[in-house]
Amino acid sequence: MELILIDKAPPTIEIYSPIDKEIIEADNIVIYGQSSDNQAVQRVEVCLDEGEYMLANGTEFWSIIWDISTYSLGNHNISVKAFDDSLCVSYYNITFILNESGHSWAPVINDFYNKPENPTNESNVVIYANVTAGSPFTIDKIFLYWDDGIDTESTQMFRYGDNPIQDRHEEDPLKNESNEPVYGFELGQFATGKNISYWIEAFDAANNSIITNTKSFTIE
C-alpha cells in the first residue's frame, strides 16, 4: 500500500523592512523579508492597506518596490502572505507612518486640569488631559509631568476608562463625557500646604509633539 504524506505545515514569513511603525518620507518604499518552508515556498504576495495583493520578487528572500506617492499621510498597513507547494499559507502584518517634511504637525491638547479643583489633604487628585489629533497622524502617547517643589516626576497617561477598563460611577465627575479624547492619571493625596505644578506632553504616531504651559494647585 502506497503511503501518501500530506503537508499541512504552512511556511514562515517575516518582513525585515520597513520595520513596524517606521516613519517614512519617500515616494517609494522597498518592502523585503524572508520566508521558509519544510518543502518549498511557492510564492510571496504583498498588499498595502485594503488594496490588491501583488507578487513579490523571490521566495526565500523576497522584495517588492511600492509606489506610495499617492497615498495619504498617516498610518498604513502592509500585509504579506507566503504559499508553499501544498498551498498552505501564512501571514505577516506591520504598519508604517507616511510623513511629509515641511509641516509643523502636532496633537492638540484642548484642555488639561485637576480634579477636584481645590483639593484637601483627603482628596485623591486626578489630572485629566483632553487630547485630539491635530494632523493626519493618530495619538501615540501622552505624558504627565509634575513637580512638588523637591522632585519632578513623570508618567504615561492613558485614555480615561480604558486602563483598566472600568464602569462609570455616579459620583464620577466625567460620567457624562466620552472616553475618546480624555486621558488621566491619579496622583493621589498630598499634605496640607503642598503646591504641585504640572504640565502635559503629547506625541503622535509620527513622533510630532506638543507641550503645554504649567498649571498648579495648592492643598488646602
Image (spheres, grey):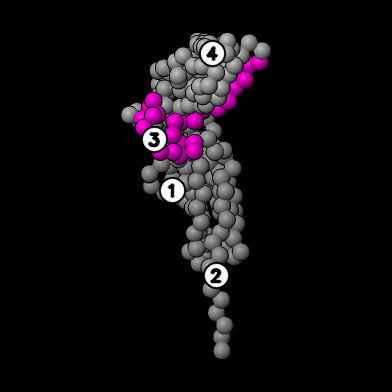
Residue at disc 2, secondary structure: loop
Question: Which badge, 3 or 2, comes first in the chain's sequence?
Answer: 2
What amino acid is labelled 3 in the image?
A: Arg
Q: Nearer the viewer, mark 1 or mark 3?
A: 3
- Give neighbour class at mark 2: few <14, some 14-19, many 20+ (Cα, 10 Å): few
Q: Is residue 16 highlighted in magenta?
A: no
Q: Is residue 152 highlighted in magenta?
A: yes
**Tag 1 and tag 4, C-beta contact below 8 Å:** no
- Give neighbour class at mark 4: few <14, some 14-19, many 20+ (Cα, 10 Å): some
Specify the farthest residue to the right.
150
Residue at disc 4, secondary structure: loop
Vertical placement of residue 172 versus 121, above or below: below
Horizontally, residue 73 falls left or right of residue 192, namely left
Examine the rendering and report whether any part of residue 185 can be seen. Answer: yes
Question: Which badge, 2 or 1, comes first in the chain's sequence?
Answer: 2
Cα separation, mark 3 vs mark 4, equals 26 Å
Vertical placement of residue 49 versus 25, above or below: below
Residue at x 50%, y 67% (from the top left corner): 86
Q: Nearer the viewer, mark 1 or mark 4?
A: 4
Specify the farthest residue to the left.
176
**Tag 3 and tag 2, C-beta contact below 8 Å:** no
Closer to the camera in the image, 144 or 207: 144
- Give neighbour class at mark 3: few <14, some 14-19, many 20+ (Cα, 10 Å): few
Residue at x 41%, y 17% (from the top left corner): 111
Q: Identify the disc placed on residue 219.
A: 4
Q: Where is residue 154? Give x, y as percent.
A: 60, 22
Numbered range of the magenta stretch: 151-175
